[in-house]
Amino acid sequence: MTTYESMRAALADVVAIPVTPFAEDGSIEHDTHRALLRRLLDHGVRTLTPNGNTGEFYALTPQERGTVVELTVSEAAGRAAIVVGVGHDVPTAIDAARHAREAGADMLMVHQPVHPYVAAGGWVDYHRAIAEAVPELGVVPYIRNTRLAGRHLAALGEMCPNVIGVKYAVPDAARFAAFARDAGLERFVWVAGLAEPYAPSYFSAGATGFTSGLVNVAPKVSLTMLEALRSGDYPGAMRVWEQIRRFEELRAADSSANNVTVVKEALAVLGLCRRHVRPPSRPLDAAGRAEVAAIVEGWGI
């Protein structure tokens, strides 16, 4: 396979978004981070995204984000494709992209621009600048903006052949189906960016991979859903959906305020890492912790 083909294959999978575990003093706990990554790899996860939202990207310093990339590449040691999350202003994103390349990463996932005024053409310019800075790396825009049209991504793809996939996270399956076809269904790998709850509907419209934070807790569950979707077994996929429904509802509640918190609480229940998250996230209350513990117990992990 060509380089881009191998990258495309890695995106058509469970794209794991690892957590970033913190020590008692609030620093990144390196040994625990490595242990969590090994657990994912040993369970068969083959695509990792350090510095994704479940990794608390926006709560990490630039130096910490670099450390997370280096730890991930080192621990994976060729066992998984590495898709590094980058973002913020263009120079910061390019610096992070070049660091990812030097560290040995395979691809970039470009977080949505954090700016109150995003023009569609400006969105194209933003991603083009990053993609052209590292032509050796595959680039995956993270789309949450409902104002973007498929033609804008198509234009970016024409200019940048290394833009090979899309993490699509607009919660509207019909919009996704239209967007993907307007942009080029075969041109890009379509990753359901809203994880397992949306994966069945997005796969039915053309997605071939999905992101996951749940996979940190229950790798087998996420991989079981992928297997069902790949084989067209939608009833089987929906059985997994029913199993994880309440867990994902807790993560999505209150505009996803506890998206990372619930995952780390579950990992704490399993004794795998501390529940600590950084502001503006915050730990669950006692009732929330008890509910997460009951869910995890019910999964029999």
Image (cartoon, grey):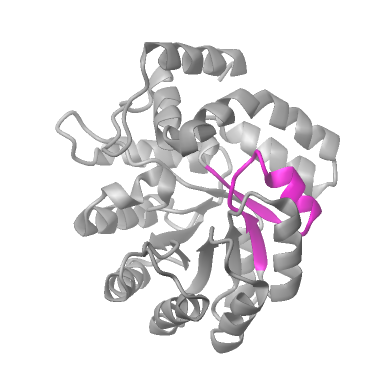
**Which residue reaches farthest bottom?**
159
Q: Position of residue 3 (x, y in %)?
A: 58, 76
- The total of numbered circles placed on residues is 0
Q: In which quarter of the image is the C terminus?
A: top right
Q: Which residue is drawn at 47% across and 47% down?
A: 17
> At 23% across and 41% down in the image, what residue appears?
28
Which quadrant holds the N terminus? bottom right
The answer to whether 245 is drawn above or below residue 215 in the figure is above
Question: Is 21 positioned to the left or the right of 191 in the image?
Answer: left
Q: What x and y, as percent, mark residue 185?
A: 74, 70
Residue sitting farthest toward the front: 117
For the point 45% across and 11% down, the residue is 290
Q: Quadrant of residue 165?
A: bottom right
Q: Quadrant of residue 190?
A: bottom right
User: Residue 12 location, x and y as percent?
Assistant: 66, 58
Residue 33 seen = yes
Near-viewer residue (280 or 260): 280
Q: What stretch is highlighted in magenta?
A: 189-212
Q: In this view, does 10 lie above or below 182?
A: above
Is residue 149 magenta-colored? no
Residue at image coords 60%, 76%: 153
Q: Which of 154 and 64 is in front in this view?
A: 154
Does 206 appear in magenta?
Answer: yes
